[in-house]
């Protein structure tokens, strides 16, 4: 049993789950996710040796579920804190801490103190206090705690930056750990968000361009977020696309809470179109995530959910078997107005057939993740004279397809990555840089310093890579190769995406499309160099 692989899988699942940080900024989420990483590391380290692989996995899954539950509760508390009265807040905190270990008198007093002070604490301070409470509770419980936890870092493990061979010197490990401890300590005590110019990117409306057979659009998140600005985004474009349906709408979506998109599907059914929906089983069973899906079900639309061991992470819609919408964008308010995302609409019956074939495997056959077999799709297509490759994970070995294209990079690689932990892809990027290709990249800040991220290795190799400047999420999963090829879809550059999740990816050779994604990259790159004041 490779426990390091188990740890990487668990850590990726925490950092890639938006539900654990949807109410948090990067600074707040970093504290919470660092605690979560330290806890899953302790769970894996403490799993008994000598037992079967199944028993070990079950023990790890149980511990991971406990950690995820605590993180989700903290995220929800931050989102609801201003509406909670003292008694309700105290009850919620008591339940949260009790789930980690025995509730001692000392912990009860600390909970009481947090309730008394919560109106004067900002979100970062509150998150820090809560994870410190959970760490104390776990240390005093029967499960023990990670010996690498410390109150000054809210239970976070020290970070390490990996060299090409996966090893660093003892001096580097100590130096990096000390620097990170100092940065986190200063951030928790000093950092405060202050109002800034509202726009966190140069544009104030979704960027959208069309080229006959495709249309591409990008979100334009603002900081600080203001619900009054939640108009005219990608949701409007997708709803308009669904409104063209006369025969069928097939939607495979991880998250859905947009009223206009939900209504568009219902309206399509009302016009006589066949409407079918696939989602993730945990999302459908989550009362905070499922209202839109329940509404579709109430209207007689069948929603099939699956992939209990990972996530059904697709974000695509096929209309009338003629056109397909896909990209990085979940159909939620946060993804539309807080996060950097992309959506691409491709008018091609051939491509639509690929997506429909994969949809049928999930909706009709109820085959998700590794249980879904390859076949029924045509990976290499020509659309209006343009070469388009279409892949689905895990059945198509998507990482190898990305690596093959990156190996051909002659002059440049630009990328934007929400999660980038795949060693093979990362090594290929570094190799092309060593061969003379210009490499630029922007990583989502939260998670970029975890031991599994490719950010550290690329930074150590001298590549021009940055942490993003959006205080919320930079959610793109994009490569632009030689200014002519775009790699885009739902596929994070991670082992979970490669082996466990339901994902889709397009590789499109089109200079005009590449220019539009390059323009988006330049916006994200510029903001990473000059983030909004906080």
Image (cartoon, rainbow, N blue to C red):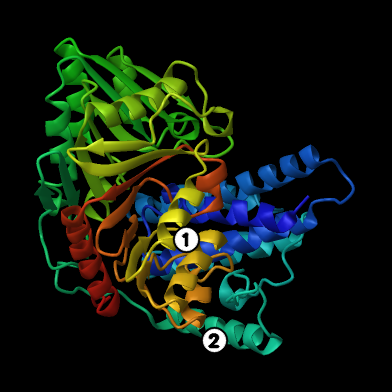
**Mark closer to the observer (1, 2):** 1
Per the image, the residue denoted by label 2 is 179
513 with respect to 37 (left or right): left
Labels 1 and 2 touching (C-beta < 8 A): no
Residue extending farthest to the top is 272
Where residue 353 appears, as percent x and y from the top left, is 31, 25
Where residue 72 appears, as percent x and y from the top left, is 49, 49
Q: Nearer the viewer, residue 194 or 502?
A: 502
Tag 2 or tag 1, which sits nearer the N-term?
A: 2
Q: Dot 2: within a 10 Å radius of its alpha carbon, few (fewer than 14), some, or many (20 or more) residues? A: some
Disc 1 and disc 2: Cα gap in Å?
Answer: 23 Å
Q: Dot 1: within a 10 Å radius of its alpha carbon, few (fewer than 14), some, or many (20 or more) residues? A: many
Q: Nearer the viewer, residue 190 or 110?
A: 190
- Residue 35 image-quadrant placement: bottom right
Per the image, the residue denoted by label 1 is 420
The residue positioned 34% from the left and 24% from the top of the image is 356
The residue positioned 47% from the left and 56% from the top of the image is 403
The residue positioned 24% from the left and 78% from the top of the image is 533
Query: Looking at the image, how many numbered discs can be counted on the residues?
Result: 2
Q: Secondary structure at mark 1?
A: loop
Q: Secondary structure at mark 2?
A: helix
- Residue 170 image-quadrant placement: bottom right
Q: Can residue 256 be seen in this snapshot?
A: no
Where residue 390 appears, as percent x and y from the top left, is 36, 39
**The C terminus, quarter of image:** bottom left
Relative vertical location of residue 131 with respect to residue 18 in this rendering, above or below: below
């Amino acid at each position: 049993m490779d426990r390091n692989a188990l740890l990487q899988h668990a850590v990726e699942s925490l950092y890639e789950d938006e539900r654990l940080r949807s109410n948090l900024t990067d600074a707040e989420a970093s504290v919470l996710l660092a605690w979560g990483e330290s806890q899953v590391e302790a769970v894996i380290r403490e799993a008994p040796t000598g037992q079967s692989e199944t028993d070990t996995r079950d023990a790890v899954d149980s511990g991971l579920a406990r950690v995820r539950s605590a993180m989700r509760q903290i995220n929800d508390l931050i989102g609801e804190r201003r509406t909670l009265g003292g008694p309700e807040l105290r009850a919620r905190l008591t339940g949260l801490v009790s789930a980690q270990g025995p509730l001692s008198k000392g912990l009860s007093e600390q909970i009481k103190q947090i309730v008394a002070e919560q109106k004067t604490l900002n979100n970062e301070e509150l998150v820090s206090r809560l994870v410190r409470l959970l760490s104390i509770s776990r240390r005093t419980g029967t499960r023990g705690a990670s010996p690498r936890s410390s109150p000054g870092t809210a239970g976070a493990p020290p970070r390490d930056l990996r060299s090409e061979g996966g090893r660093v010197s003892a001096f580097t490990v100590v130096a990096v750990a000390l620097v990170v401890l100092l940065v986190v300590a200063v951030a928790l005590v000093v950092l405060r968000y202050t109002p800034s110019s509202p726009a966190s990117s140069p544009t104030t409306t979704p960027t959208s361009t069309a080229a006959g057979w495709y249309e591409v659009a990008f979100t334009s998140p603002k900081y600080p977020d203001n619900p009054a600005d939640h108009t005219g985004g990608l949701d409007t474009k997708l709803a308009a696309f669904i409104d063209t349906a006369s025969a069928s709408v097939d939607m495979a979506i991880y998250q859905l809470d947009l009223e206009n998109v939900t209504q568009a599907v219902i309206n399509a059914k009302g016009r006589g179109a066949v409407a079918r929906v696939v989602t993730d089983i945990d999302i459908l069973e989550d009362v905070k995530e499922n209202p839109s899906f329940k509404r579709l079900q109430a209207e007689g639309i069948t929603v099939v959910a699956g992939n209990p061991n990972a996530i059904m992470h697709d974000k695509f819609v096929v209309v009338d078997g003629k056109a397909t919408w896909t990209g990085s964008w979940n159909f939620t308010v946060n993804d539309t107005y807080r996060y950097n995302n992309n959506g691409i609409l491709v008018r091609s019956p051939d491509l639509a057939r690929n997506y429909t074939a994969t949809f049928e495997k999930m909706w009709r056959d109820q085959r998700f993740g590794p249980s879904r077999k390859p076949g029924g799709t045509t990976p290499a297509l020509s659309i209006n004279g343009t070469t388009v490759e279409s892949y689905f994970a895990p059945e198509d070995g998507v990482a190898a397809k990305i690596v093959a294209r990156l190996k051909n990079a002659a002059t440049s690689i630009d990328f934007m990555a929400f999660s980038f932990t795949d060693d093979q892809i990362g090594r290929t990027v570094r190799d092309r840089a060593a061969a003379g290709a210009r490499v630029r990249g922007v990583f989502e800040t939260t998670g970029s310093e975890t031991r599994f991220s490719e950010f550290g290795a690329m930074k150590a190799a001298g590549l021009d890579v940055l942490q993003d400047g959006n205080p919320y999420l930079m959610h793109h999963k994009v490569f632009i190769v030689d200014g002519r090829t775009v790699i885009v879809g739902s596929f994070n550059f991670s082992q979970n995406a490669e082996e466990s999740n339901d994902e889709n990816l397009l590789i499109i050779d089109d200079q005009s499309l590449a220019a539009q994604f390059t323009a988006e990259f330049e916006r994200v790159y510029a903001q990473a160099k000059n983030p909004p004041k906080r």
